[in-house]
Amino acid sequence: MDIHLVELDVRKGKPGRYLTVFDFAAVSELLGAPVTCCYVNTMGPGVVAGNHWHREKRELFACVRGVISVHFAHPETGDRAEHTLVASDKGQGIVVPSGIAHAVKNCGETFADLLVFATGEPRGGDDVDFVVI
């Protein structure tokens, strides 16, 4: 599976704060197509979202609050992978290519926010249901 973590541009600010900068051109380059939609998925503790794959759409996930586990499965081979994203000043994101099933889970005890950059609209008719977790 072509799943990879990417480093985000995190700039240290004044004490107790940091700024994560998302360059849409750079994210589009990582995804290999223009970003046309950006949204935040806010999830309560233990909540799972996703459990599908996209025919064409590609996404980049970044955790901006809490702890989120990202689970992947290849629909044809059954290969699986998992990564954990933590909101921090370290700045990591993960690229989700088209054709790879994915689901996200809030692993924390408080709400978590997943920032999603996508090459298409959420629930835009490109989703194919597939149970990952």
Image (tube, grey):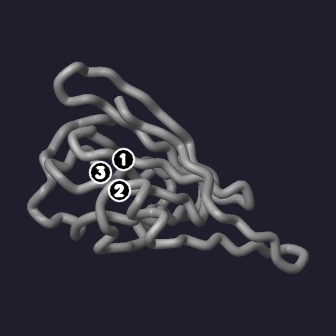
State which quadrant residue 16 falls in: bottom right
x, y percentage for residue 21? 61, 73
Amino acid type shown at disc 3? Gly
95 w.r.t. 62: above or below = above
Q: Sequence-wise, which precedes: disc 3 or disc 2?
A: 3
State which quadrant residue 22 falls in: bottom right
Of residues 53 and 9, the one drawn nearer to the viewer in this rendering: 9
Of residues 30 and 107, the one drawn nearer to the viewer in this rendering: 30
Q: Secondary structure at mark 2?
A: strand
Of residues 11 and 26, the one drawn nearer to the viewer in this rendering: 26
Q: Secondary structure at mark 1?
A: strand
Q: Secondary structure at mark 3?
A: strand
Residue 102: tell me if it is visible.
Answer: yes
Quadrant in which the N terminus is drawn: top left
Q: Which residue is mark 2?
A: 59
Quadrant in which the C terminus is drawn: top left
- In contact (CB < 8 Å): disc 2 and disc 1: yes
* Disc 3 packing (10 Å; few <14; some 14–19; many ≥20): some
